[in-house]
């Protein structure tokens, strides 16, 4: 499907955005095929949004909402990259701010251990051990999980938090200093992992994620090297 995107009719903006968003999200993942380039899907999405701005029946804000609903990491990337897509600006709310305090969606404060879970989930780690947070604060866990739900009409949706590490990884895959500077700025603003003194079973994994990410920022590791370390840590 993704290989045949260029064959889609130009007027099928929604299908093009969803398909390209899936491609960008996959390119931003550790499981991306060798020929999947962040730059390629970014360029194609820029083109679609630019076309939508010029055509009366198309809606760039509507396309951005559609993208954010189904591919929140891709939407956040388009909102934070250099020369961002304006229609996607609201998608930055999905990116978690982590460190001494942990915040997502502007108004949801996350307990540290639950924030640790969310960061690892956002980085494709398969956590089937909610016991880690439940042991520390059962009521708080349930309340915060409810805060991440959103009612849209009669449907209840899960608002998916995004890790800034994923966005920085995509930016650093470019051979462009402007993108690299932006990656450093994003990680300085949003952080890499929560700070906590609580007992957390996968703290060693989070620390490995932080070390590998800082090595990437300092040029001691390539994007492919980061991918390898992430896969090894899982």
Image: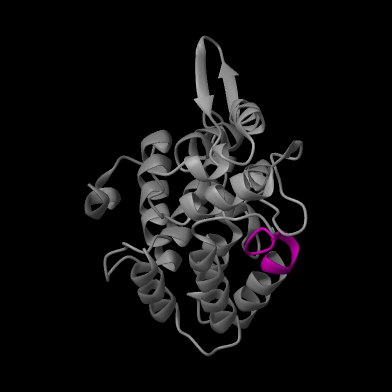
Above or below, 204 relative to 164 = below
The quarter holding residue 93 reads: top right
Q: Residue furthest top?
A: 154
Residue 11: image location, x then y, percent: 39, 35
Identify the residue shown where x is 52% and y is 18%. 156
Identify the residue shown where x is 75% and y is 40%. 106
**For this view, does 232 lie left or right of residue 191?**
left
The quarter holding residue 81 reads: bottom right
How many callouts does the rendering have? 0
Residue 21: image location, x then y, percent: 42, 47
The residues colored magenta run: 187-195
**For this view, does 28 lie left or right of residue 54?**
left
Quadrant location of the C terminus in the rendered image: bottom left
127 or 177, nearer to the observer: 127
Above or below, 230 relative to 221 = above
Residue 148: image location, x then y, percent: 60, 31
**For this view, does 9 lie left or right of residue 87?**
left
Above or below, 218 relative to 213 = below
Identify the residue shown where x is 58% and y is 26%. 149
Residue 188: image location, x then y, percent: 73, 68
Identify the residue shown where x is 27% and y is 51%. 2
Above or below, 107 relative to 77 = above
| 189 part of magenta stretch | yes
The colour scheme of the drawn protein is one colour
| 198 part of magenta stretch | no
């Amino acid at each position: 499907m993704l290989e045949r995107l260029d064959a889609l009719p130009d007027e099928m903006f929604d299908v093009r955005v969803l398909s390209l968003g899936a491609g960008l999200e996959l390119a931003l993942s550790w499981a991306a095929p060798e020929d999947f380039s962040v730059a390629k899907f970014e360029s194609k999405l820029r083109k679609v949004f630019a076309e939508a701005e010029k055509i009366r029946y198309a809606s760039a804000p509507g396309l951005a909402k559609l993208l954010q609903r189904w591919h929140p990491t891709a939407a956040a990337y388009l909102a934070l990259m250099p020369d961002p897509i304006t229609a996607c600006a609201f998608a930055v709310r999905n990116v978690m701010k982590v460190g001494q305090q942990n915040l997502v969606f502007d108004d949801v404060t996350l307990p540290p251990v639950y924030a640790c879970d969310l960061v690892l989930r956002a980085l494709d780690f398969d956590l089937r051990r909610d016991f880690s947070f439940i042991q520390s604060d059962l009521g708080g866990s349930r309340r915060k999980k409810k805060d991440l739900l959103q009612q849209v009409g009669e449907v209840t949706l899960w608002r998916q938090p995004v890790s800034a590490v994923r966005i920085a990884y995509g930016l650093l895959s470019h051979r462009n200093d402007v993108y690299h500077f932006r990656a450093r700025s994003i990680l300085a603003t949003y952080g890499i992992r929560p700070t906590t003194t609580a007992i957390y079973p996968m703290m060693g994994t989070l620390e490995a994620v932080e070390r590998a990410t800082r090595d990437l920022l300092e040029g001691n590791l390539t994007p492919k090297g980061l991918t390898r370390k992430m896969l090894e840590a899982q």
